[in-house]
Every structure is written in C-alpha cells, then in structure tokens.
Image (spheres, rainbow, N blue to C red):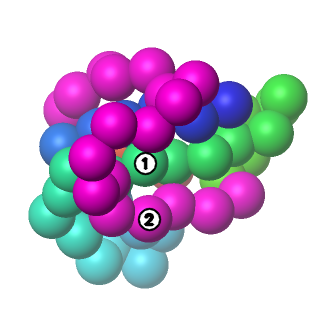
Amino acid sequence: MKRAYHDILLPDGTRHRGPVVVETDDEDRLLSWHLLDGEEPFTEWVGGIYKR
C-alpha cells in the first residue's frame, strides 16, 4: 500500500521533511519511502507524520 505524508520519522529518530510516499506490506511493515514528486497513481494522501 502506498500512502503520502507530510514528513517521515524513521526508527533511528531521523526526520525527513516531505511530502513523502511510504510503501508498506499487508501487515503495515515499512518497505520503502521516497519524496513525493507530483501525482502518483494508487497513493492515498494521509498527511501528518509517518512514524514506526
């Protein structure tokens, strides 16, 4: 699943300012993330900060 957030806070405490797209598996485990660079198909906008 792909969701877009304003920022991402990584487990090591590093915060990246976005907007960012976070991709997770069916059990909501982080697979990857990248900066949002325009419209992306099949991406849900959530907003806020992604934290795991």
Q: Earlier in the sequence, mark 2 or mark 1?
A: 1
Q: Height in image: 2 above or below 23? A: above
Alpha carbon distance from label 2 to label 1: 5 Å
Q: Is residue 49 visible?
A: no
Q: Which residue is mark 1?
A: 21
At which x and y percent is residue 29?
A: 73, 46
Q: Is residue 44 magenta?
A: yes
At which x and y percent is residue 30?
A: 66, 53
Q: Amino acid at mark 2?
A: His
Q: Is residue 38 magenta?
A: yes
Q: Amino acid at mark 1?
A: Val
Q: Residue at x 15, y 64 (%)?
A: 17
Q: Residues within 10 Å of mark 1 (few under 14, many from 20)?
A: many
* In the foreground, 11 or 6: 6
Q: Is residue 45 visible?
A: yes
Q: Height in image: 38 above or below 3? A: below
Q: Residues within 10 Å of mark 2 (few under 14, many from 20)?
A: some
Give the left or right position of residue 29, taking residue 46 as reference: right
| Circles 2 and 1: CB atoms closer than 8 Å | yes
For the N terminus, the image quarter is top right
Residue 34, disc? 2
Name the quadrant containing residue 37.
bottom left
Q: Height in image: 4 above or below 18? A: above
Name the quadrant containing residue 5.
top left
Q: Which stretch did the figure color magenta?
A: 31-49
Q: Residue at x 84, y 29 (%)?
A: 26
Q: Say which element carries label 2.
A: strand
Residue 38, disc? none
Q: Residue at x 50, y 48 (%)?
A: 22
Q: Say which element carries label 1.
A: strand
Q: Height in image: 27 above or below 13? A: above
At which x and y percent is residue 35?
A: 33, 63
